[in-house]
Amino acid sequence: MPRRRPAPSPSTLVLLVRHGQTPTTGKTLPGRAAGLHLSDAGREQAEAVALRLKELPKLDALYSSPLERARETAAPTAKARGLKATVERSLLECDFGEWTGAELKDLGKLPEWQTVQRYPSGFRFPGGESFAQMQTRMVDGIAKLVDRHPGETIACFSHADPIKAAVAHALGTHLDLFQRIVISTCSITAIAYGRSGPAVLTVNSFTGALADLKVS
């Protein structure tokens, strides 16, 4: 008798959630510095995300960047769904090295800032990570989680640049164009990963009013 082919693996739905607003959002480049917590507005955003995710018929696992602002954003969803948010280092913010903690208005005056915006694939932060390394780390991390959760739905709480890089990869878009993608605080981006490749279902779905839409 002819051997039966194995059934294709079902798609895994990955929900990428940016952390909520902090006191420094849009002002500085906090990077991986410890001790940055959600603002009051950020905590409200995190509660709103939990309500949105509660509408899902199933949510099988939660993962979070190790940084406080991401774990605090995941906490209301974990409580609402009765799940534990597992720390996953691949979801970390980009390592900005010597630029960590710098004000964006000052960084914008540097000649290197134009490279960050227009040729990110060729830029490495002084003493830190390159955008290409960040994208590889994020994409490889998601792939491992997808292998761990075939056919399931998982939420990953991360940061703007890693999520943008993951979206660019899923779309087949060059990293040099990833700065055109906007990921707002506490927005949800959904990507289904199946045997035939990723399908981007929604990007930057957020809970605020339309008047709040801005690049941050």
Image (tube, grey):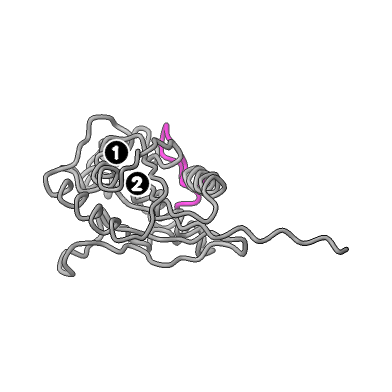
Callout 2 touching callout 1 (CB < 8 Å): yes
Of residues 212 and 68, which is closer to you in this image?
A: 68
Rendered location of residue 74, percent (x, y):
29, 44
Mark 1 lies on a secondary structure that is: helix
- The residue lying furthest to the front in this view is 1
Q: Above or below — where is 72 with respect to 200?
A: above
Q: Is residue 175 left or right of residue 31?
A: right
Up the image or down, 37 lies above or below 212; here it is above
Q: CA distance from mark 2 to mark 1?
A: 7 Å
Query: Which of the 4 image quadrants contains residue 180?
Result: bottom left
Tell which circle, 2 or 1, labels the residue nearer the N-terminal end. Answer: 1
Picture coordinates of residue 174, whole percent (x, y): 52, 60
Q: Which residue is mark 1?
A: 71
Q: Is residue 24 left or right of residue 90?
A: left
Q: Of helix, strand and loop, which mostly describes the magenta segment?
A: loop
- Which quarter of the image is occupied by the C terminus? bottom left
Front residue of 11 and 5: 5
Q: Which mark is residue 186?
A: none
What is the magenta range? 120-132
Residue at left offset 61%, top offset 58% = 9
Instruction: From the viewer's perspective, tell me whether residue 189 is left or right of residue 4.
Output: left
Q: Is the residue marked by circle 2 packed among few (<14), some (14-19), or many (20+) residues within 10 Å?
A: many
Q: Nearer the viewer, residue 42 or 82?
A: 82
Spot occupied by residue 179 in the image (x, y as percentages of width and height): 38, 58
Within the magenta stretch, is there residue 167? Answer: no
Q: Which residue is mark 2?
A: 157
Q: Is the residue marked by circle 1 packed among few (<14), some (14-19), or many (20+) residues within 10 Å?
A: many
Could you tell me the amino acid type at mark 1? Arg
